[in-house]
Every structure is written in structure tokens, then in C-alpha cells.
Amino acid sequence: MNYNDYNNSPQYYNEQSLASQTSSVLKTVYLKMCLALVVSALVALYCSTSWAYLQFISTHSWAIWGLFIVELVLVFALSGAINKLSSGTAALLFYVFAAVNGAALAPIFLVYTHASIVKTFFICAGTFGAMSVYGYFTTQDLTKFGTYLLYALFGLIIASVVNIFTKSSTMEWIISGVGVLIFLGLTAYDTQYIRNMIQTTPQSMHSKLSTYGALNLYLDFINLFLYLLRFFGRSND
């Protein structure tokens, strides 16, 4: 088969259709993720200017734990029951999660200068974007790396909990550095995973899949941002 024959073949058109479909769904994934980041940023900014809210959070430690539990419930609801939810409900829960996370992130505006937060955000956006592009275009199967990264993430969580009690500054820097590497890797892995899911999932499920994909990439971005902030953030003190 020569080049012109291939261009007119059903296989060529199927490949073109699949590529176009994948690109379209991924655009929706990134749009939803960006909208969620905007929601989180606006809620965080608003809460950081409310003295009543900040005072309540600082004097009631259970409130932060309450926000954390609500976030976990929403993440598990979206991840575990995405097929049972309508597309609209899944998207709504995702943005509710982003708002709750924004409220939990509000104190960073008191700890770090606004200028350093903005600078770190752009650094995070650049590195996140580069790894996401790599995950999309690479021909290497990242599945096995994803497994190792998840194990490393569990180890990171355990080390972080332990360091809450030991309060080692050296360990905190190590945890931050490892955290950056883990979430850079997860960004590439999740992008490839979402791309592959789009290509193997019925079109009727693409709306829900775009929300699920946006949630995963949102979590990668937020965690990467927080770990980078420990390196590039400047204290308000």
C-alpha cells in the first residue's frame, strides 16, 4: 500500500478520528482542571482575608482535620463511584472539592509572601506542563513506573506523619525534594493513563472520564505546588 492509498484507507480515518477524539477530551480535562484551580485560588484568597475564619481555624485544630476528612470523602466518592454518578453531579462534586481545598490552603497566604506564591505557581505550571506533555507524547509505557511512584507516595505520607512528631528540618527538606520528584513522575504517568483511558473508553463515558482525569491532574498540580513552595516560598516574617 502506498502513501496515498493509506491516506484513503479506513484505518487512516479511524486513527485520525481517535486522535481527534483524544485531543478533544484532553482539552476538556485541562479546562476542568484549570477551572478547579481558579476556584481553589479564589476561595483561598477570600478565606485568607477573613480574620474570623483564620482565627477559627487557628483556635480549632479539629476544623482543619474536618476539611481534610471532607476532601478525602469527596475524592473517594469521585474515584470510587464515578460510574454511578451523573456527569453533572461528578463535575459539581469536583468543584466542591476544589472549593474545600481552597479553604484548607488559605493559611499559606499568611505564611508566605504573595509574590513568592505567584512565582512558585508559575514555576509549578511550567514543570507540570512539561511533564504532562512528556506523558502524552512518550512511547514508553509508564505503567510500571506508576506502581513504584504509588509505593513511594505511601512512603512519603508515612515519613511526613512521622516528621510531624520528630520535627526534623533536615527530614522536611528531604521529604519536600522527594515529593517534588514523585509528583513530577505522577503527572507524566497520569497524563499517559488518561490518554489511554480515552482511547479505550466508550464515547458516552468521556464526560465523566474528563472529570476523573481533571481530578487526578489537579491533585498532582496542587501537591507539586505545595512541595515547590517549601523551596521557593518566602516567609512573611
Image (cartoon, helix red, strand yellow):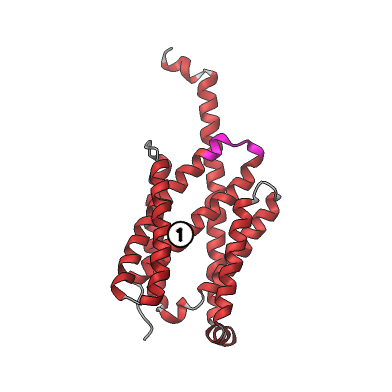
Of 128 and 31, nearer the camera is 128
Residue 109 against residue 9 in the figure, above or below: below
- The quadrant in which the C terminus is found is bottom left
For label 1, the residue is: 221
Which x, y percent locates residue 194?
51, 44
Residue 6 against residue 220 in the figure, above or below: above
First to last magenta residue range: 197-204
Disc 1 marks a residue whose amino acid type is Phe
Image-based side of 66 in relation to 226, left or right: right
| Residue 95 in view of the camera | yes
Which x, y percent locates residue 146?
42, 47
Location of residue 112 by image quarter: bottom left
| Residue 199 falls inside the magenta stretch | yes
Report the predominant secondary structure element of the magenta stretch.
Answer: helix
Residue at (42% x, 80% y) in the render: 111
- Residue projecting furthest to the top: 1
| Residue 43 in view of the camera | no
Residue at (36% x, 73% y) in the render: 233
Mark 1 lies on a secondary structure that is: helix
Image-based side of 92 in relation to 28, left or right: right
Location of residue 119 by image quarter: bottom left
Which x, y percent locates residue 213?
54, 49
| Residue 82 falls inside the magenta stretch | no
Which x, y percent locates residue 73?
62, 62
Residue at (70% x, 50% y) in the render: 85
Image-based side of 219 in relation to 179, left or right: right
